[in-house]
Image: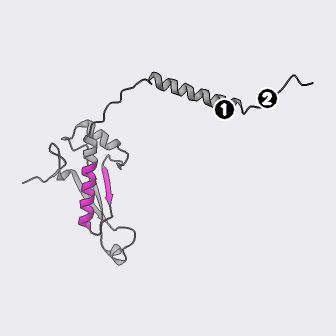
């Protein structure tokens, strides 16, 4: 039995049994066709079963802001932009591949830096200018008047 694989990049691929498709009727315009044909596709991907991916990449994938994770910890991608079920499956797979590629990129560690001497001087100078401007706006009370 030949196992089908979805190739992510040169190093990683997803076995076909780790994701499944569910179909439903799409919403929105389309007339009678929308009421008859199930073109909306929901791709469900089990991240935890995909042991080939590094653990850090799996965590990044789950915590990405555009990732929808259900209560069982499965990633759910819904696609209904296409006119056919096949087109929506292709769009969902492309979206999953893009998400995994993004999760495989290790973010650079941020190094804390100190402000330069010139930037400190510029900041203090602008504070002095603003302060002088506001001093002229104050109401003066003259105590020498009798």
> Could you say which is closer to the camera, residue 128 or residue 44?
128
Percent across and percent down for residue 26 are: 35, 67
> Could you say which is closer to the camera, residue 93 or residue 52?
93
Give me the disc on residue 140: 2
**Residue at the spot 40% in from the left edge and 69% down from the top edge:** 28
Q: Earlier in the sequence, mark 2 or mark 1?
A: 1
Q: Is residue 32 above or below residue 91?
A: below
> In which quarter of the view is residue 106 placed?
top left
Residue, disc 1: 133
Q: Is residue 77 magenta?
A: yes
Of the 4 image quadrants, the one containing the N terminus is bottom left
Helix, strand or loop under label 2: loop
How does the figure colour the protein chain or chains? one colour
**Residue at the spot 53% in from the left edge and 27% down from the top edge:** 123
Helix, strand or loop under label 1: helix
Residue reaching furthest to the bottom: 32
Q: Is residue 40 magenta?
A: no
Q: Is 9 left or right of 66, judged from the image as shown?
A: left
The magenta segment = 75-98
Give me the disc on residue 102: none
Percent across and percent down for residue 142 are: 84, 26
């Amino acid at each position: 039995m030949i196992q089908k694989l979805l190739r992510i990049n040169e190093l990683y691929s997803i076995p076909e049994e780790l994701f499944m498709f569910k179909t439903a009727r799409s919403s929105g315009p389309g007339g009678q066709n929308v009421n008859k044909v199930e073109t909306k596709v929901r791709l469900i991907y089990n991240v935890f079963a995909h042991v080939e991916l590094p653990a850090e990449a799996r965590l990044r994938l789950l915590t990405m802001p555009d990732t929808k994770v259900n209560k069982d910890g499965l990633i759910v991608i819904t696609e209904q932009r296409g006119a056919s079920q096949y087109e929506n499956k292709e769009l969902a797979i492309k979206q999953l591949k893009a998400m995994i590629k993004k999760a495989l990129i290790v973010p650079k560690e941020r190094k804390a830096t100190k402000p330069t001497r010139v930037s400190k001087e510029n900041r203090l100078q602008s504070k002095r200018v603003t302060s002088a401007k506001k001093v002229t706006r104050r109401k003066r009370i003259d105590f020498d008047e009798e």
